[in-house]
Amino acid sequence: MKAKILVTLFALILGMSGSNLRVLIVTPTPEMHCESCENKIKSNMRFEKGVKKIETSLERQEVTITYDPKKNNVEGLQKAMKKIGYDTKVVSDKELKKK
């Protein structure tokens, strides 16, 4: 029970810290052709510093990465994509609107 309370308090403190997240949308080259391509990107990019969420779309050929700009940047994320075999073109990089 105490552990649950501590985890909740920690999450609240982090939430109040005012860290603004950014959303980066890139198109990968070569194109993603299947679920395996999507899984390769997701499973590797989730370990990059600051990455909070990764979404892929085969239909639109886009990778959407939500990240903390205090821990990583566009160039760092593109470099990480390059390590796993994908060059990227930035479609958008903007601040995530808080709800």
Image (cartoon, helix red, strand yellow):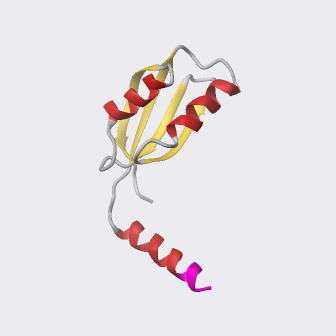
Camera-side residue: 90 or 38? Answer: 38
Please, which residue is most extreme toward the right here?
Answer: 35
**For residue 5, which quarter of the picture?**
bottom right
Q: Is residue 73 left or right of residue 65?
A: left
Residue shown at 32% from the left, 46% from the top = 69
Instruction: Indicate yes or no whether the magenta region holds residue 4.
Output: yes
Q: Is residue 40 left or right of residue 15?
A: right
**For residue 94, which quarter of the picture?**
top left
Q: Which quarter of the image is occupied by the N terminus?
A: bottom right
Residue shown at 65% from the left, 17% from the top = 33
Q: Which quarter of the image is occupied by the C terminus?
A: bottom left
> How would you classify the magenta stretch by its main secondary structure?
helix
Where in the figure is residue 74, as x and y percent of width and height? 34, 34
Please, which residue is most extreme toward the top here?
Answer: 30
Residue shown at 44% from the left, 32% from the top = 25
Relative to 78, residue 2 above or below: below
Camera-side residue: 50 or 61? Answer: 50
Where in the figure is residue 96, as x and y percent of width and height? 40, 48
Please, which residue is most extreme toward the bottom here?
Answer: 2
Relative to 15, residue 72 above or below: above
Residue shown at 49% from the left, 43% from the top = 47
Instruction: Indicate yes or no whether the magenta region holds residue 71.
Output: no
Relative to 12, residue 5 above or below: below
Where in the figure is residue 2, as x and y percent of width and height? 57, 86
Total of numbered circles in the picture?
A: 0
Which stretch is magenta? Answer: 1-5
